[in-house]
Image: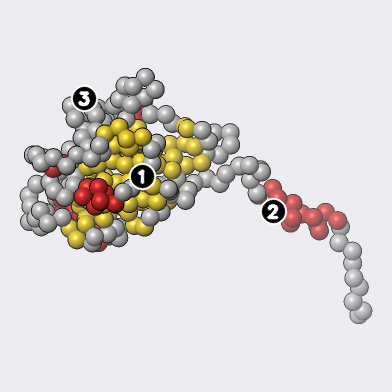
Amino acid sequence: MPFVRTRRPLWRLLWLPLLVLLALPPAGWSSPVEEPCTPHRFEGLRFTVCTVDLKVHSLQLFWRDEVGQPYRAFRRLPTTMGNEQLVFAMNAGMFRPDLSPAGLYIEDGETFRRANTADGPGNFHMKPNGIFLVENGRAAVMTTEQYLEADRSPELATQSGPMLVIDGELHPAFLEDSNSRKRRNGVGVIDERTVVFAITEQPVTFHEFARLFRDDLGTRNALFLDGSMSSLHAPSLGRSDFFRHMGPIIGALAPRERGN
């Protein structure tokens, strides 16, 4: 039987390209950004880890609002800034009773507090303490001494202490058999564009928390941010902690879809 070529209806020729076009977002819309915060386990301990890609997210410090009053709590933070939305926030380091930063604090390139090199009691003064910073879109964690020697000009910086991991080594004061277990949060840098924040979901020692950053998250430098009042705002997890008023807060923002 001879082969007979039949003409396909025009609509059959057009339906596949049409479906492809319908699946594409309208021009000017951004694709949804993967939520940064996820539950995490390490050595049988529970954490929440928030990963920030500085090629996608931007980081912002919050201390005082437009009238000069401390924000104090996550609920007072702006949820949108320009075309970005707040995707998570965390307390950003130790502070004084008046909620002012205990050490270096740089927001939007303006220095509000200089680096604190004083000796004293408490975790902040457990030397070496350190600084988390973002400069020209690149993140770093370094000891306070390294920062002061480096002539940096960051857009964002916050000082806290102690350092958790220093050039791949745990802080020398941490004891593997310590029985001091508390709620804790901190920040580490995997590479200059990838930042990881972590908060514990059960009391842990400094040694355990530092090992999370070095051995599991792969950071050669990491900084302790705070202890018992450590708090997380993560809308994707339906969570916004409030234990007591906070000083500086750090938040990650991501492009929002048009219409949000």
Picture layout, residue 257 above or below residue 65: below
Can the viewer see residue 21?
A: yes
Give the mark, 3 or 2, whose residue is nearer the N terminus. Answer: 2
Which residue is at the front of the view, 146 or 20? 146
Report the residue at 9% width, 47% height from top. 180
* Disc sitting over residue 195 in the figure: none
Earlier sequence position, callout 1 versus callout 2: 2
Q: Which of the 4 quarters of the picture holds residue 79? A: top left
Q: Residues within 10 Å of mark 2 (few under 14, many from 20)?
A: few
Q: Position of residue 251 (x, y in %)?
A: 37, 38
Crowding at label 3, few (<14), some or many (≥20) Cα neighbours within 10 Å? few
User: Of the residues shown, which amino acid type is indicated by label 2?
Assistant: Val
Nearer the observer, disc 3 or disc 1?
Answer: 1
Please name the residue that numbered disc 1 is placed on: 153
Identify the residue position indicated by label 2 in the image. Answer: 20
Q: Secondary structure at mark 3?
A: loop
Please identify, in this view, whether the residue under mark 1 or under mark 2 is nearer the observer. Answer: 1
| Image height of 42 relative to 230, above or below | below
- Category of crowding for the residue at label 1, using alpha-carbon neighbours closer than 10 angstroms: few (below 14), some (14–19), many (at least 20): some
Viewport quadrant of the C terminus? top right
Classify residue 80 as left or right of residue 147: right
Residue, disc 3:
98
Q: Circle 2 sits in a helix, a strand or a loop, which is it? A: helix
Q: Earlier in the sequence, mark 3 or mark 1?
A: 3
Q: Residue 182, image x and y in percent? A: 15, 43
Mark in the foreground, 3 or 2:
3
Amino acid type, residue under disc 1 in the picture = Ser
Figure quadrant of residue 4: bottom right
Q: CA distance from mark 3 to mark 1?
A: 27 Å
Residue 89 at x, y = what percent? Answer: 35, 38
